[in-house]
Image: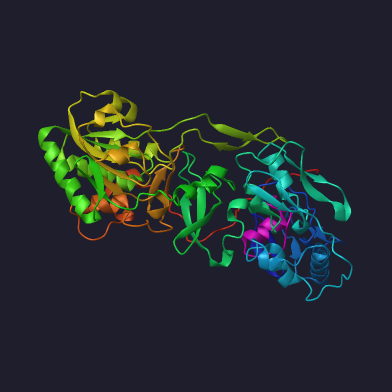
Amino acid sequence: MPSITVDGKKIEAKDRQMILQACKDNGIEIPHYCYHPGLSIVASCRICLVEVEGIPKLVPGCQTPIRDGMVVSTQSTKAVANQKQVMEFLLINHPLDCPVCDKAGECSLQDYSYSFGRSQSRFEEDKSKNPKKDVGEHVLLYTDRCIMCTRCVRFTREIAGTSELFVDGRGHKEEIEIFPGKPLNNKISLNVVDLCPVGALLDKSFLFAQRVWMLKRTPSISPVDAGGENIWIDQNENAIYRIKPRINDKVNGYWISNDSRHAYKAVVREDRLVRARTKSFGAQGEIRFADALKVADDGLKSAAKTGALFAVISPMLPIEEAYLLGLYIRSLDANATLVMGPVPTSTDEAFKSSVSGKETFRIQGEKVPNRRGIERVFDKLGGARTTWTEFVQHTDAGYAGGVITGGYLSNWVSEVPAVLKNKFVVVQDALPGPIADAADVLLPGAMWCEKDGTFENHQNTLQAFVAAITPPGSAQVEGKVYHKLLGRPGDYSAQAVRDEIGEALADVVVPPSEEAEGAESPAMEFAEL
């Protein structure tokens, strides 16, 4: 591996890696705006200029490949003077609205202004003012905050391939625009909000909702489809305010879908199931969770004496909870049938670069996160198994009762199937629906962000995640419920269940404790805007 010297420190770099990325990989910060490792390199912001020994002028760190033995200075008199000048130019027309800007606290313009800028502005003329624009269903553009880094334009061309955004005008009249009649409404459009280094592009659903320095960040996995997109859940005081992408080069790269970002909206629905219920004289009534759990256990044991039991295991459940539920139902009936819950499926949606024509991102058509993980559990437990479609068709299978789990982000059935009628049915779900409303015992369950567990995506990658918030009301994590029903000592632990399952979960990817920047540099590529 080639090595270079940066500010007197020798560092290792990758072949043909750019100076800026090599420095980032080694913990050396070079200010930058237009550069992003997932996009082409345009070197337009000019704040990353560095001094290289043997070259008579400053060169852009983002666009200059390293060579073995190169000597770089990011703190020389010339480099620092350039940083200050660039910051002064960027702030000439930038409004001083940090107190009301959603980006405040995570804005690189703020950070670099403090680190490299001047304490006072020398600009005494009137600032150029531009209107706020509604550029799409989910995105607002505050034009006067834009520093023309063009990250958003390059994203719509090189990643989304939809090219809704372009640069209009020149000089102080230059601004980002959408083509007439073509709003920014593609299904990965909200990634431009993350790309924007300032507060120009903002998510409407997060607008004025929370100060970012008050948010706590938890690593998780998207529940909206089989893609297994890595995400960060930002929450405060047990309320989720936004979801952002977590970099994983092998799964989702730097991007996530809009559906993943809005997955938390199902968690905060006003009709969340938060109280246990049992049926009496044909109607459900609220009851203490512990009492409902005893009614459920006693009812299932009685049903097992008169016929077969079943367990509908939702592909929204993590592997650990599915495994405990399978053990529990088999402890009551050794021949109980394990049923894969409904797996809503549509067509995959692929995005291709309009520049290279290569596929850049894919939204999976399978709209559950853990079908393969549930199948892994079924293989581990053995015995009778079936799908939801086959299960609802066998009305004469001799079932006496069973457990049904949900956890879907929307209502997953339109009516109660005939196979469940006149059976003792225990439902554990988070959202209301026909089956929950007809259950003999309803146990309010937790959503994916309220529990620890493991999902297996369409690539058979096992990815662990941790709880970001706690369930509302008396809702309980399913794993805790079946841990208790199995009579196991101590508290439920997803890690302990993973250890129990053993080799089948040996390759689980454990999430990081804190965010890391992408380590890979793109190949040398240049874009013309």
Main secondary-structure element of the magenta-colored stretch: loop
Residue at figure coordinates x 32%, y 48% from the top left: 320
In the image, is residue 468 above or below residue 262?
Answer: below
Q: Is 34 a magenta residue?
A: yes
Quarter of the figure with the N terminus: bottom right
Nearest to the observer: residue 150 or residue 138: 138
The image shows residue 391 at horizontal and vertical percentages of: 28, 28
Q: Can residue 138 be seen in this view?
A: yes
Q: Is residue 217 left or right of residue 4?
A: left
- Residue 215 locus on image (x, y percent): 53, 64
Residue occupying the point 74% across, 69% down:
113
Q: Position of residue 315 (x, y in %)?
A: 37, 39
Between 219 and 74, the one nearer to me in the picture:
219
> Which residues make up the magenta segment?
16-36
Residue closest to the eye, 25 or 446: 446
Q: In this view, does 212 lie to the left or right of 507?
A: right
